[in-house]
Image (cartoon, rainbow, N blue to C red):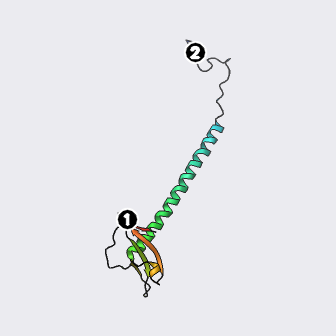
Amino acid sequence: MTNIAENPSLLPYGSNIGAPAIKPDNINSWKNTGVIKVNQQLSVKFEELKIEYLKLVEEYKWNELVYKSKFNFEPVIGKLYHLYIGNDGELFLSLIEPSQWHRECIGSFKLSNEQKWIKI
């Protein structure tokens, strides 16, 4: 039994000691390019998520503030309301426009159909 392949000319590599050495391609530049591209994509996605997260936190804080304020009516979806600081220092919600009243207005809000307060 010999150590020679049946059809050595069809093999993608040398079949004897005299055959040229097999040298793997240098793929480091391909790898580096891939790493750079993927890192750029991940960095962009991270920044998008960070901005979205900050918007969500801000939305949460405004909703908490409005829901904890005083109001003695059931707000109507889509109607504009204004958040004021009362004489007692507590926050209250009102339909009165800031231009019609000389109180410190924190902001104006609309109630969405998802029961979320949207700062206007």
Q: In the rendered view, does 61 fall on the left or right side of 1? A: left
Q: Residues within 10 Å of mark 1 (few under 14, many from 20)?
A: few
Q: Secondary structure at mark 2?
A: helix
Residue lying furthest front in this view?
100
Residue under label 2? 10
The x and y percentages for residue 67 are 38, 73
- Evaluate whether residue 3 shows in this view: no
Amino acid under disc 1: Ser
Q: Quadrant of residue 77?
A: bottom left
Q: Indicate the quadrant where residue 108 lies.
A: bottom left
Q: Residues within 10 Å of mark 2 (few under 14, many from 20)?
A: few
Instruction: Determine whether label 1 and label 2 are within 8 Å by CB.
Output: no
- Label total for image: 2
The relative height of residue 92 versus residue 39 in the rendered view (above or below) is below
User: Camera-side residue: 102 or 14?
Assistant: 102
- Residue at point 47%, 66% (across, down): 57
Find residue 112 and name its label: 1
Where in the figure is residue 31, as x and y percent of width and height?
62, 39
- Distance, label 1 to label 2, CA atoms, is 72 Å
Label 1, secondary structure: give it.
loop
